[in-house]
Image (cartoon, rainbow, N blue to C red):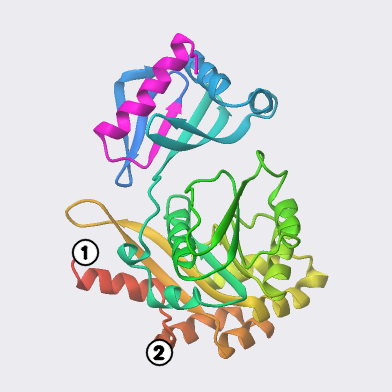
Amino acid sequence: MQLSPNAQIMWDRLESYPQEYSLSDLHIRSNSPFSIRSEGSILNFEDDPVTKEEILEFVEATATKEQYEQFLETGDLDYAVQTGEFRYRVNCLKTIKGPAMVLRLIVSEIPDIEKLGLPEAVHNVLSKKAGLVLVTGQTGSGKSTSLAAMIDKINRTRNEHIITIEDPVEFVHQDKNSIISQREVGAHTDSFAAAIKGALREDPDIILMGEMRDLETISMALTAAETGHLVFGTLHSSSAPSTITRLVDAFPPEQQEMARGMIAGSIQLVLSQQLLKRKGGGRVGCFEVMVATSGIRNLIREDKIPQIPTIMQTGAQYGMFTMEKYYEQLVKQDLVG
């Protein structure tokens, strides 16, 4: 790739900073210092200012012509870029100071589910043939990493057709015991909703959706889960009850009773997570698990979602626990302060 001098400066940064620092994100803003997020905190490099021209020329060089024009017109753009050994998920935005970028460093090596320490109930749900599995949490909480590890375990242990719909594709899976078709919104399909609608005609067993963003996407995911597919998705919610509420509230009021019935019938598990600073450095996962027992399903149908935490607190035999309970265990193990 032939780069302009300004674009080359940016390219060099994206190759050098991950080699020097343990980072998850790069924050690049016009006429501001280059910044990174390392172990949860923002670090600024005052001696490394970024210009507007460097950002614009980098985006023009690494995005498609259509994507670059979209950014100039709308002020928003998502795409992925590979610089040497490092792959990034790129979000471009216009700000009061000028164009900016936030780049999430994608760990190309698919994580081992055993090393992530995901709860036992998560392992158990991976043998299900149908239903909806949701991984929730704020941006940067490790949702994509957990999902990639789950898909990898299915890929290694089951003989299935797995379709992933992502924006953008982060972890690239190779066929093992299963076969995998990975699609990127924008590059391979117009939208999540169009891709999942198409997926139902593509003989899938497992469908992974990067994000359930709107009513159409949520409706299609529930339909897929109800018709004999195991569907994985993410939401930006902080707990299992708030996740169920978000799903229901996506529907118009006159459809919410029907929605509660669909959710109650299809939900298998909700894993909510966040990453905390580990004592001594690094990060540690903090989890909440809701398993769809008959009691949980009844509360969803009967619109008694606020009562879900009570069942979670007494559902240890099913692998359930609240975020607060898991945090207490991390404190007892002296992993967090």
Which residue is tagged 2? 317
Q: State which quarter of the image contains the C terminus.
A: bottom left
Looking at the image, which residue is at 52% across and 71% down? 270
Residue 19 falls within the magenta-colored stretch: yes
Is 171 rendered above or below residue 272? Answer: above
Q: Could you tell which of marks 2 and 1 lies nearer the N-terminus?
A: 2
Foreground of the two, 88 or 287: 88
Residue 34 visible, this orientation: no
Type of residue at label 1? Leu
Foreground of the two, 269 or 48: 269
Depth-wise, is mark 2 or mark 1 nearer the camera?
2
Is 294 rendered above or below residue 303? Answer: below
Spot occupied by residue 261 in the image (x, y as percentages of width and height): 72, 80
Spot occupied by residue 262 in the image (x, y as percentages of width and height): 71, 76
Spot occupied by residue 30 in the image (x, y as percentages of width and height): 47, 20
The part of the image, by quadrant, that contains residue 24 is top left
Type of residue at label 2? Gln
Q: Callout 1: helix, strand or loop?
A: loop
Residue 31 falls within the magenta-colored stretch: no
Which residue is tagged 1? 335
Task: Please give left or right for residue 261 compared with residue 323 in the image.
Answer: right
Spot occupied by residue 124 in the image (x, y as percentages of width and height): 45, 78
Magenta residues, as a range? 1-28
The part of the image, by quadrant, that contains residue 273 is bottom left
Q: Are marks 2 and 1 in contact (CB under 8 Å)?
A: no
